[in-house]
């Protein structure tokens, strides 16, 4: 069961006073306190958890964000930043005594600079919105999380989001050039810009993927790329995951980094085919989609090499897309994997570990054993190129104890990922979901060092507390403290 | 005193027992970079010279921080892999003996011409083990290429010039080497036209992996990959640029880019002051024009104009920094006295400087590691 920081009743008692103060900063409808209107903010993409915030505030300018944070800092009030709320790890789960800071109104594109191959946008712009803004010139923004239609670039920065193309094009952190952030003290800081490499420490790198715990992002400069001329995909079925895994390893060993390389196991293939009718073979144990992108001549050349490698690894079925329609059809199945699984099960949990690719057969075998023990079904989709595994655990929340069992099963899968040399999360973030599993991967010393970074940014632990780190430590305990006049500020606050 | 630990534990013990600060070195090839640190204990990490793991098909390499870069490059070259960020060899530029260690490369976050396509050293660091200024052994990241578990501490370590922690081992992402390369050369362009041409090439889908302009030599555009693809992209670019082009074959291309990567134009005189200036690429010509009116210098552009290399005989720090509307300038090569007196790294505003100090403190509260190497108090 998830334990969140204890609400501070002295803050809750001041709710209307706080709302009034926020209204002084954000006039009009930007401050929400009616429960019916706050309801939409009670969960993010991890719907198993919900919590009504104390208040919601929707600022429109960096100056307002700065004033809100400074007010929160001076008054010891917790802040939970939120983009579109599509996080799958509960990163934007509200706190009972916290202000939910929604960045949705930061939805403007500020500067499209093709000459310098970058775009400057506000954090509430959607991931796909960036691509839409630049595609008239043939450009796009490379990281493509599956929620790209809805998720915001600010959220992508917070989570360091990936996508199916990140083996070749990198995660968010490899595609962000600059940020404007506001610290909890209200200080506005610019990191990077249209130039390459940070001056001083790479705080841009630390901010990216910090899950809203270090600062609030108010402006993002991203790298944009010219779209590849063409793309073709191979759809390859294998009699076992070993052969499929070997095929992936051989493709990479042969010197190729495909734009996308996705694998599905038998349960996923069947769920998808029933739903989408993409023409997936049903008599295989593993299905691989390998996509090559680039100039025609290169793609045609490499897809031949991929076919040869697939055959050498005992592929049972092999189709190469000959048209854009066919390529999209191959992908239609993979992209519908989550809803397809949603169709065959009332509920599912989506896990997100990364493993050394060669361990895939072992992990799948152990996972099958766990499925028996927990008496639950599991389907697997796998970003095969980079080893990022998404087991989908099927369950029915209306049945007594099944959510609990599914969560325990999920935790065991992630422990398994760590045991074979992998990690708890490849792209969804730790949030609240994997928070308590952090000690599986990190020692206390490792975690303490990360917490000290948190203290350097947010000494009072007011930004998104209860996420990422499992244990409560005050920054004073961590050996770093702001003491003024011999007194700790806000001694009544729980400190992380 | 010189400490030369042989294990992370021994290193941690030296740090715990330390009563005065350390200068951290691998093989000492970049000691002349950054603000000088003198009269300190030396913490020599050259014993951390080993390969923990090299798994070509998993694209990971886990090596001791004191492993010479050349050893690493030879090792992965056998499997046709490379470090895609194009690690430079500044030995001739700095007058040192060789290209140094992996730990030093990472500590300075050094990347070459391919940075514009493949990212910087920081983009290829997957994990590390290090000892903090508290004398604690910690790890961050992991031996997988995709990981968002916890803060991205490896990125923070990249470019921290040994001021935060002493690395014992680092995990790098390795990638398949391109099969071949060619370079398009345009001759006789002025700065404005050159940057425009480079931008045009970078805006195309030709996947240019190097774009440099060396006044008096030419404007260079590198294409890498499989041969038929290069031919296709070369023809496409030629049409797009609509200018007279020459071609460098694979061998010539490779040597040309090594020269740009290693800043060969400035190795003839070790006495000049060398600046590494990172700016939005389109601003490079106007910055140079502004500076030309003020003092004499040599220069060339890498990163499609985004990196200005500049050398001059006299110190013109303030003129250079005043000429930058954005970006940053680093005084990469200068005599010790000058590095003591002027800002080697771009000065930061008060908020950012304070945050940097707090970050430093979070790793090294007693200021034991390379104190003042980057900024005073950091």
Image: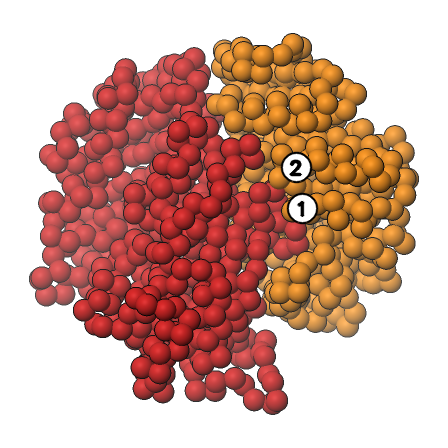
Chain colours: A red, B orange
Q: Nearer the viewer, residue B324 or B229?
A: B324
Q: Is residue B244 visible?
A: yes
Quadrant in which the N terminus of chain A appears: bottom left
Say whether marks 1 and 2 touch (CB < 8 Å).
yes
Q: Is residue A4 above or below residue A253?
A: below
Seen as rendered, the residue at the extreme left is A399
User: Looking at the picture, how far across and down is residue A105, in whole percent?
Assistant: 36, 56
Label placed on residue B283: 2
Using the image, tell me which numbered label, if any, was put on residue B325: 1
Q: Is the C terminus of chain A in the top left, top right, bottom left or bottom right quadrant?
A: bottom left
Q: Residue at x 17, y 28 (%)?
A: A278
Q: Is residue A395 left or right of residue A431?
A: left
Q: Secondary structure at mark 2?
A: helix
Image spot of residue A407 (x, y percent): 24, 60
Left or right side of A222 for A277? left
Residue found at x 40% / y 40%: A130
Left or right? Give the position of B39 relative to B372.
Answer: right
Residue drawn at point x = 45 percent, y = 54 percent: A209
Q: CA distance from mark 1 to mark 2?
A: 8 Å
Q: Chain of mark 1?
A: B
Q: Is residue B202 above or below residue A6?
A: above
**Nearest to the observer: residue A316 or residue B370:** B370
Q: Earlier in the sequence, mark 1 or mark 2?
A: 2
């Amino acid at each position: 069961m998830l334990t969140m920081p204890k609400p501070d009743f002295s803050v809750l008692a001041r709710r209307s006073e706080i709302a009034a103060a926020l209204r002084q900063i954000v006039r009009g409808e930007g401050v929400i306190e009616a429960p019916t209107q706050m309801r939409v903010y009670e969960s993010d993409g991890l719907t198993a958890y919900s919590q009504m915030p104390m208040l919601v505030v929707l600022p429109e300018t960096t100056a307002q964000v700065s004033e809100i944070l400074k007010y929160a800092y001076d008054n010891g009030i917790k802040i939970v930043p939120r983009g579109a709320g599509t996080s799958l790890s509960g990163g934007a789960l509200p706190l009972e005594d916290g202000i939910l800071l929604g960045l949705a109104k930061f939805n403007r594109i500020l500067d499209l600079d093709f000459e310098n191959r970058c775009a400057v946008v506000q954090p509430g712009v959607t991931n796909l919105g960036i691509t839409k803004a630049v595609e008239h010139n043939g450009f796009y923004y490379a990281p493509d999380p599956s929620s790209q239609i809805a998720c915001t670039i600010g959220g992508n920065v917070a989570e360091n989001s990936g996508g199916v193309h990140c083996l070749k094009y990198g995660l968010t952190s490899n595609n962000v050039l600059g940020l404007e952030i506001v610290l909890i003290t209200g200080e506005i800081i610019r990191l990077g810009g249209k130039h390459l490499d940070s001056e001083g420490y790479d705080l841009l790198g630390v901010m990216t993927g910090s899950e809203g715990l270090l600062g609030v992002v108010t402006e993002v400069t991203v790298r944009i790329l010219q779209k590849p001329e063409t793309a073709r995909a191979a759809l390859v079925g294998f009699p076992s995951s070993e052969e499929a895994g070997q095929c992936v390893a051989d493709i990479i060993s042969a010197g190729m980094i495909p734009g996308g390389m996705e694998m599905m196991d038998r349960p996923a293939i069947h769920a998808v085919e029933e739903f989408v009718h993409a023409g997936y073979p049903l008599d295989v144990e593993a299905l691989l989609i390998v996509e090559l992108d680039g100039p025609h001549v290169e793609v045609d050349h490499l897809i031949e090499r991929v076919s040869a490698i697939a055959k050498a690894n005992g592929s049972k079925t092999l189709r190469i897309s000959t048209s854009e329609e066919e390529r999209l059809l191959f992908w239609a199945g993979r992209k519908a994997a989550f809803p397809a699984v949603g169709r065959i099960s009332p509920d599912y949990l989506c896990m997100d570990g990364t493993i050394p690719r060669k361990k895939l057969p072992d992990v799948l075998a152990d996972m099958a054993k766990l499925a028996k023990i927990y008496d639950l079904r599991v389907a697997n989709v796998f970003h095969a190129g980079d080893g990022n595994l998404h087991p989908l655990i099927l369950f029915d929340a209306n049945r007594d104890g099944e959510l609990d069992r599914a969560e325990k099963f999920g935790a065991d899968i992630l422990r398994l990922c760590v045991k074979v040399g992998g990690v708890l999360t490849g792209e969804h973030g730790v949030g609240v979901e994997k928070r308590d599993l952090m000690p599986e991967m990190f020692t206390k010393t490792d975690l303490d060092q990360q917490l000290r970074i948190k203290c350097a940014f947010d000494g009072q632990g007011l930004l998104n507390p209860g996420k990422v780190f499992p244990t409560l430590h005050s920054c004073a305990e961590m050996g770093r403290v702001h003491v003024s006049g011999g007194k700790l500020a806000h001694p009544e606050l729980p400190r992380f | 005193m010189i400490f030369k630990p042989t294990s992370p534990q021994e290193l941690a013990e030296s740090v715990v027992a330390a009563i005065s600060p350390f200068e951290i070195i691998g093989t000492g090839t970049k000691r002349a970079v950054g603000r000088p640190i003198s009269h300190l204990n030396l913490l020599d990490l050259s014993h951390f010279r080993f390969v923990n793991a090299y798994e070509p098909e998993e694209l990971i390499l886990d090596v001791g921080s004191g492993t010479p870069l050349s050893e690493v490059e030879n090792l992965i070259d056998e499997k046709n892999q490379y470090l895609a960020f194009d690690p430079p060899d500044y030995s001739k530029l700095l007058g040192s003996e060789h290209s140094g260690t992996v730990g030093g490369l990472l500590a300075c976050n050094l990347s070459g011409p391919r940075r514009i396509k493949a990212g910087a050293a920081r983009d290829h660091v997957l994990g590390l083990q290090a000892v903090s200024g508290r004398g604690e052994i910690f790890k961050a990241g992991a031996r997988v290429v995709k990981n968002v578990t916890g803060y991205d501490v490896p990125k923070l370590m990249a470019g921290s010039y040994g001021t935060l922690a002493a690395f014992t081992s680092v995990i790098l992402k390795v990638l398949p080497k391109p099969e071949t390369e060619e370079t398009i050369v345009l001759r006789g362009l002025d700065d404005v036209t050159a940057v425009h041409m480079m931008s045009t090439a970078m805006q195309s889908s030709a996947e240019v992996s190097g774009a440099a302009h060396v006044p008096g030599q030419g404007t260079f555009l590198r294409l890498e990959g499989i041969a038929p693809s290069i031919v296709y992209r070369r023809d496409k670019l030629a049409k797009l640029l609509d200018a007279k082009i020459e071609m460098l074959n694979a061998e010539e291309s490779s040597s040309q880019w090594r020269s740009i990567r290693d800043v060969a134009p400035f190795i003839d005189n070790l006495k000049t002051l060398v600046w590494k200036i990172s700016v939005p690429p389109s601003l490079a010509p106007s910055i140079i024009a502004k500076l030309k009116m003020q003092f004499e210098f040599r220069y060339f552009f890498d990163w499609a104009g985004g990196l200005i290399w500049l050398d001059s005989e006299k110190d013109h720090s303030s003129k250079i920094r005043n000429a930058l509307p954005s970006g940053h300038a680093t005084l990469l090569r200068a005599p010790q006295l000058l590095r003591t007196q002027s800002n080697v790294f771009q000065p930061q505003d008060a908020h950012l400087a304070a945050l940097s100090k707090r970050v430093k403190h979070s790793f090294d509260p007693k200021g034991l590691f390379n104190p003042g190497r980057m900024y005073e108090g950091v």
